[in-house]
Image (cartoon, rainbow, N blue to C red):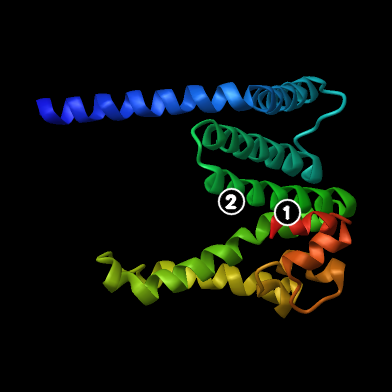
Amino acid sequence: QSRMDDMLEDQYAIQSEFDDNLYDMWAEALNLLQGLIVISDEAAQGYLKRSDKYSENDITQNLLVRLHAKANQISKEILSLIRHGFADGAQARWRSLHELAVVCSFIAQHGDSVAERYIQHESVEIYKAAKQYNQYYTKLGAEKIDDSEMALIEKEYQELVDKYGKSYGSDYGWSATTLKLPRPTFRDIEASVKLDHIRPYYK
């Protein structure tokens, strides 16, 4: 235990020195990013307090507020990764942030019908994940999702596909009707909200 404690103490000291050197070099940029995140947090909190502007019964508005909170969380993860020198990890999370920005822009442009489809599409993702899980549960050393639960998951999935059409079952099926595409991709959504110029950074 003593050797472990000494080893960890050395590692903490090395990491701390690395973090200090990184901050000395990039302090201005890191502080600007943190400042932007704080402003974004405070703006959201201020918006929610203005009851004349915000209503929980507004599907689009409520969804965008929740996605905004998720974006802020991702931004904090990015900042933490950058501060500790994990540039590739930060880049991966920044890709997620761009994806969220594209989704938010699309929902904001098209309103409640798309917002509702987006929210309900979680059931499609659950169905696909459950099918994949049951395919590999033995190798995972886990228990199978029982047939009755799987039947309920599949029933909810099928009801949504019957309601919105076959395209709804695809990965970005919640955008299919609006884009008039049978199997829309993220790139289609990105182009429709004119954020495709960021793709070189995204790639």
Tell me which corner region of the image, top left, top right, bottom left or bottom right, holds residue 177.
bottom right
Q: Which mark is residue 92?
A: 2
Q: Which residue is mark 1?
A: 201
Left or right for 26, reference 104: left
Quadrant including the C terminus: bottom right
Compared with 79, 93 (above or below) is: below
Q: Give the number of the mark in front: 1 or 2.
A: 1
Compared with 103, 86 (above or below) is: above
Judge the density around disc 2: few (<14), some (14-19), many (≥20) Cα neighbours within 10 Å: few
Dot 2: what SS?
A: helix
For the residue pair 91 and 149, the one nearer the viewer reads as 91
Tell me which corner region of the image, top left, top right, bottom left or bottom right, holds residue 18.
top left
Amino acid at the residue labelled 2: Ala
Task: Estimate the spatial distance between the alpha carbons at disc 1 and disc 2, rounded to whole Å.
Answer: 11 Å
Q: Position of residue 33 (x, y in %)?
A: 69, 28
Q: Are marks 1 and 2 in contact (CB under 8 Å)?
A: no
Q: Position of residue 173 (x, y in %)?
A: 72, 69
Amino acid at the residue labelled 1: Tyr
Compared with 111, 139 (above or below) is: below
Q: Position of residue 67 (x, y in %)?
A: 69, 42
Compared with 46, 185 (above or below) is: below
For the residue pair 147 and 110, the one nearer the viewer reads as 110
